Image (tube, grey):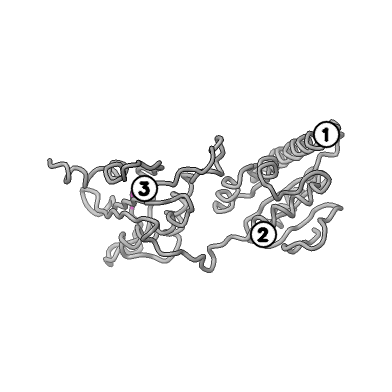
Amino acid sequence: MPSDIRLAFAHPEDRAAATSPDNPRDRISLRDHVVSADIGAFQTERGRPQRLRFNIVVEVRPADAPIADDVDRILSYDRLTEAVAAELAGDRLNLLETLAERVAERILAEPPALRVFVRVEKLDRGPGALGVEIVRARASAPLRSVGPGEALHPVVAHLDAAAVMAPDLGARLDRLIARGRPLVLTVGLPEAARPAATAALVQQRIDLLAIEQMAWVLAGRDRRCLVVASRTELDHAIRQGRTVVWAPAKLILDSHDSPRGATGTPVTLALWLAEQLAAERLIVHGATLPPAGSRVPVERA
């Protein structure tokens, strides 16, 4: 088989490698991702979900600093599966070409993405796989605007130690979940005494670790709660509709504008996170409210 024909049927990873410039780029890939969807232009396809197989390769811009084993500094694989899920969750489509275009456009909206190969195949239309493959680069991709319903504005709820340990914890969470918004929970310091340090930075780390212990206590008391630490984990869990409990140390220590020292009380950290997430509101379960002047509405439970 001639090499050009062999390459035409090769996996997108091989096609990306064969068409890369002289300075090869880093790539991430999603291989053989199979989902079911109602798609197709023929009447016989309507109302009959069929299997689609996605193979996606993304060439990414090299990081401008060491990634330091930090998931927030890379393009996460979750962004690829989320792009597929988001486009399939929208209007019913007739053409694989349209689906592939929209998935590629969504992926190229990610800052590190430079070029994307998207192959989509129908697996139930015959004895073989019928599909399309497209290649799109950032330079040729239209600017993507965030349309209605795409931005997720969660509710952030702060629970002090008493609320975490309260007998009605489950009922409180039920009421928060019933609001119909993605839910991010923050927690206060434990009521038990903590080690005291003379250095402010050391004390801050001790306090952050104590808050994270309370986060795990909350997750242990209600199985719906998922403890997350990085911004990537937060965004992914929010998109998945999970009830999230924030472990704050990573984001607080990594961010230059986060509350520090005496201003870094647990409820102030909750307000900072709510502003970072463009939350719909911050709901405080406890006696202490954050300082006035917030960009996010604050209410007491």
Q: Is residue 119 left or right of residue 258?
A: left
Location of mark 3 (residue)? 56
Location of mark 2 (residue)? 279
Crowding near the residue tagged with mark 3, few <14, some 14–19, many ≥20 C-alpha atoms within 10 Å: many
Q: Is residue 242 left or right of residue 63?
A: right
Q: Whole-Å distance between the Cαs marked 1 and 3?
A: 49 Å
* Residue 178 position in % (x across, y down): 67, 59
* Residue 87 position in % (x across, y down): 43, 59
Dot 2: element: loop
Crowding near the residue tagged with mark 1, few <14, some 14–19, many ≥20 C-alpha atoms within 10 Å: few
What residue do we see at 66% from left, 40% from top? 250
Could you say which disc has been placed on residue 199 in the image?
A: 1
What residue do we see at 39% from left, 47% from top? 58
Three-letter code, disc 2: Ala
* Residue 156 position in % (x across, y down): 70, 55
Q: Whole-Å distance between the Cαs marked 3 and 2?
A: 32 Å
The residue segment tinted magenta is 51-55
Three-letter code, disc 3: Ile
Three-letter code, disc 1: Ala
Earlier in the chain: of badge 1 and badge 3, it is 3
Earlier in the chain: of badge 2 and badge 1, it is 1
Q: Residue furthest left?
A: 1
Q: Which of labels 1 and 3 is toward the front?
A: 1
